[in-house]
Image (cartoon, rainbow, N blue to C red):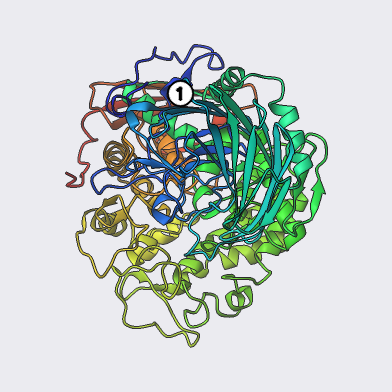
């Protein structure tokens, strides 16, 4: 077995990838360490990631559950610091701050009374599309792999066992208490000596989730027990209830394979999914197919870099491809937002799990470069929610909007995709959805109030400052899209609304502040005090952290602050202050001064120096954040990865640029940590990055060239990437003459 301590602490021993090599055949998956971000070390932070088997953007996420009821601190169901496994479930979220899914849990046992088992990292391993662990209590080796819609288990029992068995638990789920989760109904039906089918309908963070399953065993059942909330029956054909469990016995077996296909639509569709994806291949063949697909996906960005950097980089790239999730079956059916079953046109797929408050910032802009086809599918999936629900997703989970967070950041995702010319998007339908979503009042979005006051009054709408700033940005995105569609009157109206952020700027305090519906500033005001998700003007942050959230009008913000020098001085205070006031929000972590890298509102701020005439500080900070807030351990992220957003920040920043305004089509240059890179853009072209250093510690830009021409404004157009070309950095270990640096430790 592989010693995971060695994996976490030692360099990955693989052959270096040459950017000139064929990315499709290079085993870049060997650099991925799925244990990064799976658990805090010594009171540190994690990413709430999981190590189990999944396919890129797949429906199935098959992974161990180390908590009986995963909660906020273990949202993905697995914590590296735990020593007990309760089973292996087929769905989960990656890197979120709230837990849901954790569906259809299986546990192999020899002792029929056993409901969990101890395990050790010394007998645990993981790679893209594969997971393995030894369950120590019964000495059962578990191996997991996956197709897009099917989880495949291989259980090897100890030699001589006469009681190989598998537990199925339909009551096990995420965090029952906080979200009031309950099973509305569920069913287990034994349909043959080797097949079991069923479903469960559950409510929680996503209201009314329906998940259907079809299970096939490689060995015939010797007998089974169905448990309905403590009432057991032997060898019954079916059980229905709200607390269902089962024990399936196989007698004397050395090995049992178990294949579990799922569907959001029907048992029959789950069966079709299995027949299409997993019926004609062995476990080892499916494992190899998963590895090949991950190599194809990860190979879209090939880099030369030190071994440690490759491990962090490719694990981050892997995490950006775990979600969103496929939400349609092989026959093209999916569950719409009104719970009806709908049929896709040939060649289309439907996706869900859109953590948009997070992923619009960097993950979706990354997809526009390396996943243009999927980007079109993502946009179409969001627009389908508008068709059946009336407006675009805020935070969509299993096809349902859970309304988590604020703003409507499907808008910048759609605007960005359309403005970048992504093929396969119905532009007029997409704009219709954008306009309706920014004019139809709904939860946390009273647009009648927005239009009446020109800001969100705190006495009428909680989280008013954050919502004002974020809706101003969404309106700017809508204005650009309206202009591109030739709708000048809409463009002018949305552009005017994009300036509403100014109505909450208080020149006296130098911050954005809350007003009431009478226009009065709300007292007392403390720029260091944190809000959470309601009851305060700021969302998961404070006035300092939200001051910089004007990504669509940085020049306007600079002017409000008093010019570039005053702006940079305020940034200096932000990144060096040690002042605190009251309890910090749990989502604020990974601090550099008041900057909180562990939560997304801060992610673009270090790049603002480059737009204000002090690029050396951007370069200093980006290097510092990469070095100190990312690592190769289980606590490798400075906060929740949030469906790959923390990882996407790293991918862009390691390549040397970042989308400060995600829908602008412009990236701001920072400083790269790779040596060379080749980005395959999905249109048959490639963008290469070459880095020249005058020393190992060189991080400051002496000059940067795009296709041989010097970039002096530190702005890189998206068009220059997707059309193919070359970006060259010349780095030195000293900043430009007269550049001031921050006192970072």
Give the residue pinned by disc 1.
158
What number of labels is visible?
1
Q: Is residue 196 at all visible to an observer of this figure?
A: yes
**Residue 708 sits in quarter:** top left
Q: Nearer the viewer, residue 713 or 129?
A: 129
Q: Residue at x 63, y 58 (%)?
A: 202
Q: Nearer the viewer, residue 593 or 715?
A: 593
Q: Residue at x 56, y 70 (%)?
A: 444
Q: Residue furthest bottom?
A: 518
Give the quarter of the figure containing the N terminus: top left
SS for dot 1: loop
In the picture, measured across the screen, residue 420 lies left or right of residue 693, that is: right
In the picture, measured across the screen, residue 376 lies left or right of residue 607, that is: right
Reply above or below: 387 against 715. Answer: below
Q: Position of residue 698 (x, y in %)?
A: 25, 27
Q: Residue at x 39, y 12 (%)?
A: 15
Q: Position of residue 489 (x, y in %)?
A: 71, 64
Reply above or below: 48 against 564. Answer: above
Q: Position of residue 621 (x, y in %)?
A: 28, 43
Give the quarter of the figure containing the C terminus: top left
């Amino acid at each position: 077995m592989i010693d995971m301590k060695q994996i976490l602490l030692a360099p990955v021993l693989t052959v270096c990838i040459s950017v000139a090599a064929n990315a499709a055949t290079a085993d870049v998956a060997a650099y991925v360490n799925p244990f990064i971000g799976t658990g805090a070390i010594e009171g540190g932070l994690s990413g709430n990631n999981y190590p189990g088997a999944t396919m890129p953007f797949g429906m199935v996420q098959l992974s161990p559950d180390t908590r009986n009821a995963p909660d906020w601190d273990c949202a993905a169901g697995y914590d590296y610091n735990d020593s007990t496994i309760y089973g292996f479930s087929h769905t989960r979220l990656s890197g979120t701050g709230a837990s849901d899914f954790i569906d259809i849990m299986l546990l192999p046992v020899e002792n029929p009374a056993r409901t969990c088992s101890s395990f050790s990292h010394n007998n645990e391993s993981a790679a893209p599309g594969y997971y393995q662990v030894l369950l120590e209590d019964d000495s059962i080796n578990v191996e997991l792999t996956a197709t897009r819609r099917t989880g495949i288990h291989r259980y090897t029992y100890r030699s001589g066992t006469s009681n190989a068995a598998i537990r199925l638990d339909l009551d096990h789920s995420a965090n029952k208490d906080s979200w009031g989760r309950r099973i509305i109904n569920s069913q287990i039906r034994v349909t043959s000596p080797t097949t079991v089918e069923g479903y469960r309908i559950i409510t929680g963070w996503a209201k009314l989730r329906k998940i259907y399953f079809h299970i096939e065993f490689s060995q015939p059942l010797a007998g089974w027990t169905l448990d309905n909330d403590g009432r057991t029956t032997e060898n019954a054909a079916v059980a229905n209830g709200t607390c269902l469990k089962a024990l399936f016995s196989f007698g004397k077996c050395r090995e049992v394979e178990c294949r579990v296909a799922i569907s959001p639509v029907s048992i029959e569709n789950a069966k079709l999914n299995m027949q299409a994806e997993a019926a004609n291949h062995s476990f080892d063949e499916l494992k190899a197919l998963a590895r090949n697909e991950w190599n194809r996906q990860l190979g879209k960005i090939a880099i030369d870099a030190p071994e440690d950097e490759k491990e962090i980089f490719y694990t981050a790239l892997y995490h950006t491809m775990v979600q969103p999730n496929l939400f349609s079956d092989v026959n093209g059916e999916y569950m719409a937002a009104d719970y009806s079953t709908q049929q896709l046109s040939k060649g289309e797929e439907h996706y869900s799990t859109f953590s948009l408050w997070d992923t619009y910032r960097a993950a979706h802009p990354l997809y526009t470069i390396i996943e243009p086809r999927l980007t079109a599918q993502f946009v179409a999936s969001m627009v389908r929610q508008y068709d059946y629900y009336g407006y675009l997703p805020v935070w969509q989970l299993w096809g349902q909007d859970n309304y988590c967070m604020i703003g409507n950041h499907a808008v910048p995702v759609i605007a960005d995709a359309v403005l970048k010319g992504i093929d396969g998007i119905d532009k007029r339908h997409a704009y219709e959805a954008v306009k309706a979503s920014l004019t139809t009042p709904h939860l946390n979005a009273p647009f009648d109030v927005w239009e009446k006051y020109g800001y969100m009054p705190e006495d009428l709408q909680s989280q008013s400052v954050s919502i004002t700033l974020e809706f101003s940005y969404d309106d700017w995105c809508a204005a650009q899209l309206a202009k591109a569609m030739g709708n000048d009157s809409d463009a002018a109206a949305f552009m005017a609304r994009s300036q509403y952020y100014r109505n909450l700027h208080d020149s006296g305090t130098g911050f954005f502040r809350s007003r009431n519906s009478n226009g009065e500033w709300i007292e007392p005001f403390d720029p260091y005090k944190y809000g959470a998700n309601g009851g305060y003007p700021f969302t998961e942050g404070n006035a300092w952290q939200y001051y910089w959230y004007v990504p669509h009008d940085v020049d306007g913000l600079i002017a409000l602050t008093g010019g570039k020098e005053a702006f940079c001085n305020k940034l200096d205070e932000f990144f060096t202050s040690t002042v605190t006031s009251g309890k910090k929000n749990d989502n604020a972590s990974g601090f550099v001064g008041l900057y909180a890298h562990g939560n997304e509102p801060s992610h673009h701020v270090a790049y603002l120096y480059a737009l204000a005439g002090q690029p050396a500080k951007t370069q200093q900070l980006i290097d510092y954040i990469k070095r100190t807030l990312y690592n190769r351990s289980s606590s490798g992220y400075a906060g929740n990865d949030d469906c790959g957003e923390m990882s996407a920040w790293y991918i862009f920043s390691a390549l040397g640029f970042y989308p400060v305004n995600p829908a602008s089509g412009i990236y701001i240059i920072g400083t790269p940590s790779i040596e060379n890179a080749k980005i395959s853009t999905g249109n048959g072209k490639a963008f290469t990055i070459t880095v020249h250093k005058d020393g190992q510690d060189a991080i400051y830009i002496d000059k940067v060239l795009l296709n041989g021409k010097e970039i002096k404004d530190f702005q890189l157009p998206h068009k220059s990437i997707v059309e193919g070309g070359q970006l060259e950095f010349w780095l030195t270990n000293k900043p430009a003459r007269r550049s001031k640096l921050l006192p970072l430790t």
